[in-house]
């Protein structure tokens, strides 16, 4: 497709760390077109106002009428859960998709302690502001998975892309063999 062969970088950032929730880091954006018009940007953040001392990342949001100028929304959309081992330290890299029933599903990378591989989990929302964690793990692999992205397909199905970390026979202590991208429909 000729349309996507070249890109032109626009001046300035769309969002900057400017409050205690996101002043240390902003990364991994995901933008969604709102049914009523405008856009909502979900992003990973960290700052001194993190929910608890060991927290390593959570998901915030900002809204825009034009997709270029964003106003940060108050509060955390999704935070780690210290009592859930695979989700005790961070939730990052959001990807949001519309569901057929009018709700929204967020897929995200979730991580606990170093001996617990990163996994992909999900949450559901009717307004994209309040998210309810869905039980269980959506995707996992022995070395961990992350960086999830969801793509809606024309036939109504969807495809998930993410990376998988693969370690040798000695496990993580002997180093990463490789990472690769894979997808599931």
Image (cartoon, rainbow, N blue to C red):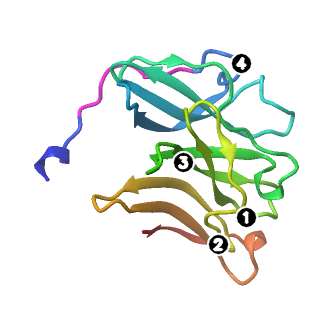
Compared with residue 136, is residue 132 higher up or lower down, i.e. above or below? above
Within-10-Å neighbours for mark 4: few <14, some 14–19, many 20+ = few
Residue with the mark numbered 4: 20
Question: Which residue carries the number 3 mark?
Answer: 105
Q: Position of residue 112 (x, y in %)?
A: 79, 54
Q: Which residue is mark 1?
A: 117
Q: Is residue 168 above or below residue 161?
A: below
- Residue at the spot 56% in from the left edge and 37% down from the top edge: 126
* Image quadrant containing the C terminus: bottom left
Q: Is residue 97 placed above or below 75 in the rendered structure?
A: below
The reply to whether the C-beta atoms of the residues labelled 1 and 2 are less than 8 Å apart is yes
Residue drawn at point x = 58 percent, y = 20 percent: 73
Numbered disc 3: secondary structure: strand
Give the main secondary structure, helix, strand or loop, of the magenta stretch: loop
The foreground one among 21 and 74 is 74
Q: Over which residues does the magenta segment extend?
A: 8-16
């Amino acid at each position: 497709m000729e349309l996507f062969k070249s890109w032109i970088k626009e001046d300035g950032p769309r969002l900057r760390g400017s409050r205690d929730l996101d002043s240390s880091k902003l990364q991994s954006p995901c933008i969604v077109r709102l049914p009523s018009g405008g856009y909502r940007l979900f992003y990973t953040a960290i700052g001194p106002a993190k929910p608890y001392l060991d927290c390593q990342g959570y998901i915030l949001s900002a809204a825009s009428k034009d997709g270029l100028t964003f106003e940060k929304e108050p509060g955390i959309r999704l935070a780690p859960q210290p009592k859930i081992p695979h989700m005790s330290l961070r939730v990052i890299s959001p990807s949001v998709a519309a569901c057929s029933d009018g709700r929204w599903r967020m897929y995200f990378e979730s991580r606990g302690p170093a001996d617990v591989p990163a996994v992909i989990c999900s949450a559901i929302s009717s307004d994209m502001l309040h998210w309810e964690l869905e039980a269980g793990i959506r995707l996992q692999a022995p070395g961990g998975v992350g960086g999830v992205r969801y793509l809606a397909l024309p036939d109504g199905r969807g495809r998930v892309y993410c990376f998988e970390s693969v370690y040798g026979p000695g496990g993580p202590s002997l180093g990463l063999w490789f990472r690769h991208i894979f997808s599931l429909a």
